[in-house]
Image (cartoon, rainbow, N blue to C red):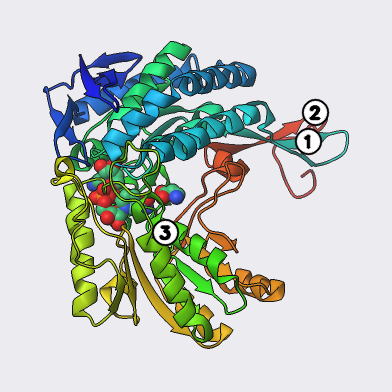
Amino acid sequence: MSTTIQLYGGRKIDIKTGLFINNEFRPSANGSVLTTPNPATGENLATISAATAEDVNAAVTAARTAFETTWGKKSTPSQRCSLINKWADLIEANIDSLAELESVDNGKPVWMARDVDIKDSIGCLRYYAGLADKIEGRTIEQEDGIKIAFTRAEPIGVCGQIIPWNYPIQMFMWKVAPALTAGNTVVIKPAEQTPLSALRLAELALEAEFPPGVLNVVNGTGAITGDAISRHMDIDKIAFTGSTVTGRKIMEAASKSNLKKVTLELGGKSPVVVFDSVDIDQTANWVCMAILFNHGQDCCAGSRLFVQETIKDKFFEVLKRKIEEIEIGDPGVETTFMGPLVSRQQQEKVKKYIQHGLEEGAVCLTGGEQTLAHLPEKFKDGFFVPPTVYTNCKKGMKIVDDEIFGPVLAVQTFKTEEEAVQLANDTAYGLGAGVFSQNASQCMRMVHALKAGTVWCNQYMVLSNAVPFGGMKQSGFGRELGIEGLKEYTQTKAVHWNYGEEISWPLNGTNI
Ligand SMILES: NC(=O)C1=CN([C@@H]2O[C@H](COP(=O)(O)OP(=O)(O)OC[C@H]3O[C@@H](n4cnc5c(N)ncnc54)[C@H](O)[C@@H]3O)[C@@H](O)[C@H]2O)C=CC1
Ligand code: BAL
């Protein structure tokens, strides 16, 4: 079962379309399929298998067997390190076609898929592979010469992972790399909007010769496949990235089934605070990056901008100019900064928010309801949305309060640092936050005051595989990346060891 996908420049790639279970691509138990469009044109790109609850069972059985035999209980850290590195090498060798595949399925520019998402994902695999033999417990001194206690950091078991469509390859690796490194096995469900790159990654894992059952990829819908994973009685941990609404459902399903461990990386409405000491040109660049990278389809997009009143006119003028310079169009062209959004549904959602902004009395600095008239005919049914900035925003407006997940920026002004902190923290979310100021003491005060899992100073959106990422408040819990991300895939076993004490029986108050 395979299909040919048209890439750019007349290139093509053959993709296996089945579910990847126990190192085999197979159709779903009842023949279910789903289709995925090319977001730039709206045309159907591929039809692939969609997993039923029965297929999820088969994947979990394969993962359990691998955990109990080849991978979890029997592999050595250096074996895991070497296989994960081999997979990284194969991905690197196929980076160009993989980037084009990601771009045609997701809509993001091909350079972004290649030079950001996939390069970081290869780095993520190598970072965790390097940690495989550095997973450690500790000894805790007890009675000298008689007893010792120590801890072991053991793998958790079979991990269910449910990922979104905004960074299909990167989210796949943020979850799979630490899980496999620690000795767990995986059943992962990609988003139904972007199922293709995961199938190619599975093919490359097969080529790397991972044992059967270690990695299982089950495409499908959230309501069927995702739900079956969340409720499964033999999945030990679930890791999720996506909307807060779905995060709540997953937590509920986990609590009503086997109390599997849960980590959630959810939505955001991240603030970016600009003080009047900044270099306006540079800061405007970072503000564009904060809201427009990946078309604003980012959980930590800087979607609420707070500018100190003293510089607002100049700042708005520069920001408007920079946004209007952006190249929007063909994601296959290297100079394109913005392609289409991922789906018709996401396009309609974002357009609705653009409409709300006008109705709620915000002032449109750029974008708005304008159509992208310059787009060529072949993209007329694509899911494009113009980057849009609203000023005169205030709390209570939908564009200020809701996660839009698109290129829409809501701008407010402030007078004092205290006011900036109050406005920035006035949200249910706590994923990212940015502060721009030439005053280091002010930056440090803001770092302490902002309630977010990541705070960027004089930059935004920059991540590192070595630095933990995750949310506070309703943006979720648990961390990905860094050593913290690996620890989410181990569980602590405490061992109390007696090598000298004998007890008399029955115990009483004199011989204890
Ligand atoms: N934090 C983030 O990175 C993301 C946030 N979102 C937000 O969510 C909004 C809606 O996008 P969706 O794609 O509908 O998000 P979603 O949270 O529903 O989808 C993310 C993943 O969860 C799965 N899923 C959906 N329902 C499920 C269920 N009942 N049980 C288990 N898994 C389930 C989906 O199939 C997908 O793989 C976006 O507009 C955006 O605001 C979306 C994607 C990523
Ligand atoms: N930018 C970090 C990952 C995410 O958006 O889900």
Q: Of circles 3 and 2, which is in front?
A: 3
Q: Is residue 154 above or below residue 10?
A: below
Residue drawn at point x = 52 percent, y = 69 percent = 451
Of the pair 220 and 319, the residue shown nearer to us: 319
Side (left or right) of 108 relative to 150:
left
Residue drawn at point x = 22 percent, y = 80 percent = 360
Q: Which residue is mark 3?
A: 301
- What separation in Å lies between label 3 and label 2 (alpha carbons)? 56 Å
Of the pair 321 and 99, the residue shown nearer to us: 321
Question: What amino acid type should be assigned to the residue bearing mark 1?
Answer: Ile
Relative image position of residue 492 (x, y in whole percent): 60, 39
Q: Is residue 108 above or below residue 452?
A: above
Badge 3 vs badge 1, beta-carbon distance below 8 Å:
no
Looking at marks 3 and 1 on the same chain, the residue that comes earlier in the sequence is marked by: 1
User: Which quadrant would the N terminus be assigned to in this image?
Assistant: top left
Q: Of circles 3 and 1, which is in front?
A: 3
Relative image position of residue 472 (x, y in whole percent): 49, 62
Question: What amino acid type should be assigned to the residue bearing mark 2?
Answer: Tyr
- What separation in Å lies between label 2 and label 1 (alpha carbons)? 8 Å
Question: What amino acid type should be assigned to the residue bearing mark 3?
Answer: Ala
Looking at marks 3 and 2 on the same chain, the residue that comes earlier in the sequence is marked by: 3
Q: Is mark 3 within 8 Å of ligand 2?
A: yes
Q: Which residue is mark 1?
A: 148
Q: Residues within 10 Å of mark 1 (few under 14, many from 20)?
A: some
Q: Of circles 2 and 1, which is in front?
A: 1
Residue 475 occupies which quadrant of the picture? bottom left
Q: Which residue is mark 2?
A: 499
